[in-house]
Amino acid sequence: EATIEHSDYRNKLSQIRNIYHQELEKYDQACNEFTTHVMNLLREQSRTRPITPKEIERMVQIIHKKFNSIQVQLKQSTCEAVMILRSRFLDARRKRRNFSKQASEILNEYFYSHLSNPYPSEEAKEELAKKCNITVSQV
């Protein structure tokens, strides 16, 4: 069961990673396309008014700065997704440490019927473990 849990966690983590890389690729592509578009517009405008290379460079820097802030948001939301996934799996693991309702009833029944000596012998432990579908060490 722990192996299934572990592979499920890894699969979900892998999904988050893939989505992050896909989105990052989209942002890079959009940034490049937008930068090219703005540079083409500035080249066209340079026919009607003087535009210095410094102005073009400044515009490109502004565009890159905006896209970098979007990338930071993407990283933050990805980190949040990983942390949420992690806490869900850790919480699920903690909850699973409890015995089934039936096992708890059987163990409690044994405990209350043997209050004077509540510690079972090795044979009784084996029998309880079989009844409860747990290991002898858990008894």
Image (cartoon, grey):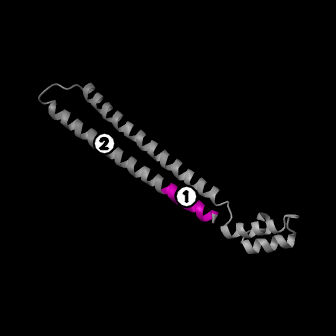
Residue 101 x, y percent position in the rendering: 66, 67
Mark carried by residue 32: 2
Residue 46 x, y percent position in the rendering: 16, 30
Q: Would you say 63 lies left or right of 95 here?
A: left
Which residue, given by chain and number where applicable, does mark 1 sit on? 10
Tell me, yes or no, whether the highlighted magenta stretch contains residue 100: no
Instruction: Bin the neighbour count of mark 2 within 10 Å (Cα to Cα): few under 14, some 14-19, many 20 and up.
Output: some
Vertical position of residue 128 compared to residue 34: above or below: below
Q: Which amino acid does label 1 sit on?
A: Arg
Residue 79 x, y percent position in the rendering: 49, 45
The image quadrant of residue 112 is bottom right
- x 79%, y 64%: residue: 137
The residue range painted magenta reads 2-14
Residue 8 x, y percent position in the rendering: 55, 61
Q: Would you say 25 lies left or right of 4 here?
A: left
Q: Which amino acid does label 2 sit on?
A: Asn
Vertical position of residue 69 compared to residue 127: above or below: above
Q: Quadrant of the C terminus?
A: bottom right
